[in-house]
Image (cartoon, helix red, strand yellow):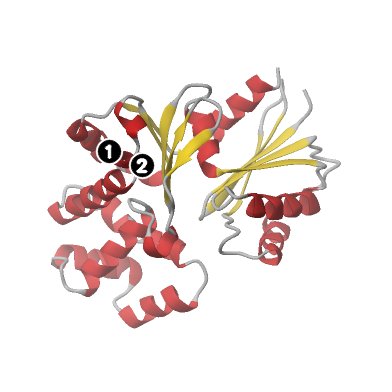
Amino acid sequence: MKAYLLADSGSTKTDWCLIKKGKEPLYFTTSGFNPYLQSKEDILKTLQKELEWNNEEHKASKLFYYGAGASTKEKQALLEEIMIEHFGVKKVKVEGDLLAAARSICGDKKGMICILGTGSSSGYYNGKNVKEQQPSLGYIAGDEGSGNYMGKRILQYYTYGTFDAELKMHFEMHFGSDVRHIVNKLYHEPYPNRYLATFVSVLSENRGHYMVENIIEDCLNDFFQTNILKYRQSWNLPLYFIGSIAFGFKDIIESLCNQYELELGNIMKSPMDGLIKYHLEKSE
């Protein structure tokens, strides 16, 4: 088997892995990429800064790139150009992050695929391809159940005086009390979705508090209502979840699946291990 370079890119970070049968995988990490939020020049600059690549030392015959914002032919072509230019690989295949999640967690089995990380998305996987996908309104008007979606709710609860003294103090310890500064970061600095997602630490570090549990359940229920329940396949196929939010709050997801009488398949934090397994098996 020739060596393959795999990339799984979300809005916050990109996991890279160079694989070859019989060899130990080589792992790398960079910032996340999204061609809807970044130009070709921005992505190339980040790669040059965070992942210098020597194609002689780490020679790959093919690069499989899976990423957020990479589901259209136009964005796939753009990312393909970037990968060829930076890595010097002649063969590049670009796919959306939903297919990465599906191949990682389902392999060749059918299932409903749900991503809950900094952003969110969902789709029906027929064992080979993602055949149906709920439209996305992105981090400004959509991304229900995601880290950035929860972050907005946390910021609202703090700013509007809904938090009690305990949660208010916790928020200020991590993010300060100057709302004008926070708003300036949201509207005048890059990647506001990543910044909003950092507020989720208020939830993960205060589990058991009734306001925290309400926020988590409300936000995840919004994802069920706007995504999962829109698919007829959800009623006869297992649901598979992947991403930091899904993994961190899997108890609430389990509870909601029971509430809606839906079958829960598996919940994973990251797709990379599953992608390695998938591509090694397909190369045989």
Location of the N terminus (image quadrant): top right
Q: In this view, does 261 lie above or below 30?
A: above
Task: Pinpoint residue 272: horizontal percent, then vertical percent.
Answer: 55, 35
Which residue matches tag 1?
A: 253
110 or 171, nearer to the observer:
110
Task: Pinpoint residue 269: horizontal percent, then vertical percent.
Answer: 43, 38
Give amino acid for label 1.
Ile
> For the point 32% across and 24% down, which residue is it?
236
Q: Which residue lies most toward the right here?
A: 56
Q: Can residue 280 be seen in this view?
A: yes
Q: Residue 262 carries which label?
A: none
Which residue matches tag 2?
A: 246
Q: Is residue 120 above or below residue 166?
A: above
**Number of numbered discs overlaid on the protein picture:** 2
CB-based contact (under 8 Å), mark 2 and mark 1: yes
Relative to 109, 116 lies left or right:
left
